[in-house]
């Protein structure tokens, strides 16, 4: 995430809705990928320096503090992010608003990265989201198991993933080192973009040399993975154990990992904890990140917390990340907004 400032000079953050120093209203402008300081008027108009006029997303008033702005003349009630929802959780249930709010926070962060990378999100194959619960959590719901996944341009997430205790329990049960809502969303977006990114036959061929053939029997491979676990040598070839389950999962895991690293590195560079890429040179972002991640983990241990970055990047994984980078940034530019 990049650095944002209020017009008063105060540093502000991606989710902020008001400046704590000057009390101006703040909102995120998805076309410009900027947090904008706004003057509020009695009729609901919000004016930006320079004269542009905005209003709040309806979910800001109704449900949670969505800070994404709409242009005043926009015919929609919901912002670019909120209007991508096909299904939201039943809000008469205790805690569901809290869990949904967390989902939306992670979703906006995902969308920030996808917009910064200029990836297609709207049009004929627009991306949609469904936030569902199953009857392990809510006995009134028919469905006994809602799996997180991607199908037909729609990402489905079980809202239990936003419940810290439930997610930690799932992580333990699956022997995972890393499980977050944002990680799920990034992974599923990797499935969503696979076809678009590998539309050129030459890229699809190269993709298969890195990840294997995504047409391999998917359900058989997943069944084998859940029955037998990952191959013993998975850490030498894959970014996560789950990535070894099937080529399509390897692609999605690596795509998610590209977003983890580039977003975290952008934050580090904004805070001057890592040097900027040199102008005119291909950004050596993987090596920059590895140096930083070692320190990040050590700082976290000093604070008595788990490693925030529990991954190793062996050479084959670096090659795969480099390939994803070339798919997403053909000119080699930084993904900053
Ligand atoms: Zn301010
Ligand atoms: Zn919104
Ligand atoms: Zn997947």
Image (cartoon, helix red, strand yellow):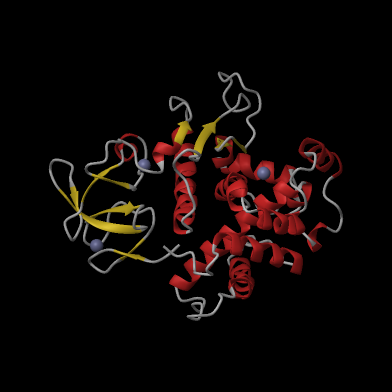
Please state the horizontal and vertical placement of residue 318, each as a whole percent of the image: 69, 67
Relative placement, left or right, of 175 versus 289 is right
Relative placement, left or right, of 96 versus 309 is left
Quarter for ligand 2?
top left
Which of the pair 6/328 is nearer the observer? 328
Above or below residue 253? Residue 55 is above
Please state the horizontal and vertical placement of residue 125, each as a whole percent of the image: 51, 39
Please state the horizontal and vertical placement of residue 70, each as a whole percent of the image: 29, 45
Query: In percent of the image, x 28 and y 58: which residue is there?
Result: 36
Query: In percent of the image, x 63 and y 60: which residue is there?
Result: 324
Query: In percent of the image, x 50 and y 51: which residue is there?
Result: 110
Residue 12 makes an appearance in the image:
yes
Query: In percent of the image, x 44 and y 71: which residue is there?
Result: 270
Residue that sits furthest to the front in the current view:
201
Which of the pair 237/333 is nearer the observer? 333
> From the image, which quarter does the C terminus lie in?
bottom left
Relative placement, left or right, of 163 versus 175 is left
Above or below residue 180? Residue 101 is above
Q: How many marks?
A: 0
Residue 308 makes an appearance in the image:
no
> From the image, which quarter does the N terminus lie in?
bottom left
Please state the horizontal and vertical placement of residue 38, each as a whole percent of the image: 21, 55
């Amino acid at each position: 995430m990049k650095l944002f400032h209020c017009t008063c000079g105060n540093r502000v953050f991606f989710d902020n809705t008001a400046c704590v120093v000057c009390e101006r209203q703040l909102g995120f402008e998805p076309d410009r990928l900027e947090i904008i300081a706004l003057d509020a008027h009695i009729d609901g108009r919000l004016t930006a320096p320079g004269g542009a006029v905005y209003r709040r997303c309806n979910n800001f008033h109704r449900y949670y503090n969505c800070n994404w702005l709409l242009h005043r003349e926009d015919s929609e009630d919901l912002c670019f992010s909120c209007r991508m929802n096909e299904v939201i959780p039943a809000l008469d249930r205790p805690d569901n608003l809290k869990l949904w709010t967390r989902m939306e926070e992670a979703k906006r962060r995902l969308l920030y990265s996808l917009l910064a990378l200029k990836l297609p999100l709207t049009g004929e194959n627009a991306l949609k989201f469904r936030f569902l619960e199953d009857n392990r959590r809510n006995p009134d719901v028919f469905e006994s198991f809602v799996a997180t996944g991607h199908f037909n341009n729609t990402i489905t997430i079980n809202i239990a993933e936003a419940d810290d205790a439930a997610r930690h329990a799932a992580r333990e049960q699956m022997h995972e080192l890393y499980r977050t809502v944002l990680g799920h969303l990034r992974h599923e977006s990797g499935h969503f973009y696979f076809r678009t990114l590998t539309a050129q036959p030459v890229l699809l061929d190269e993709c298969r040399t890195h990840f294997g053939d995504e047409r391999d029997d998917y359900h058989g491979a997943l069944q084998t993975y859940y029955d037998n676990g990952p191959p013993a040598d998975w850490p030498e070839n894959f970014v996560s154990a789950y990535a070894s389950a099937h080529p399509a999962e390897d692609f999605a895991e690596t795509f998610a990992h590209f977003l983890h690293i580039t977003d975290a590195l952008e934050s580090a560079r904004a805070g001057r904890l890592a040097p900027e890429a040199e102008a005119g040179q291909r950004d050596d972002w993987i090596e920059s990140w590895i140096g930083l991640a070692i320190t990040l983990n050590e700082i976290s241990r000093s604070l008595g917390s788990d490693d925030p970055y529990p991954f190793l990047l062996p050479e084959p994984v670096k090659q795969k990340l480099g390939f994803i980078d070339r798919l997403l940034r053909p000119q080699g530019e930084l993904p900053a907004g």
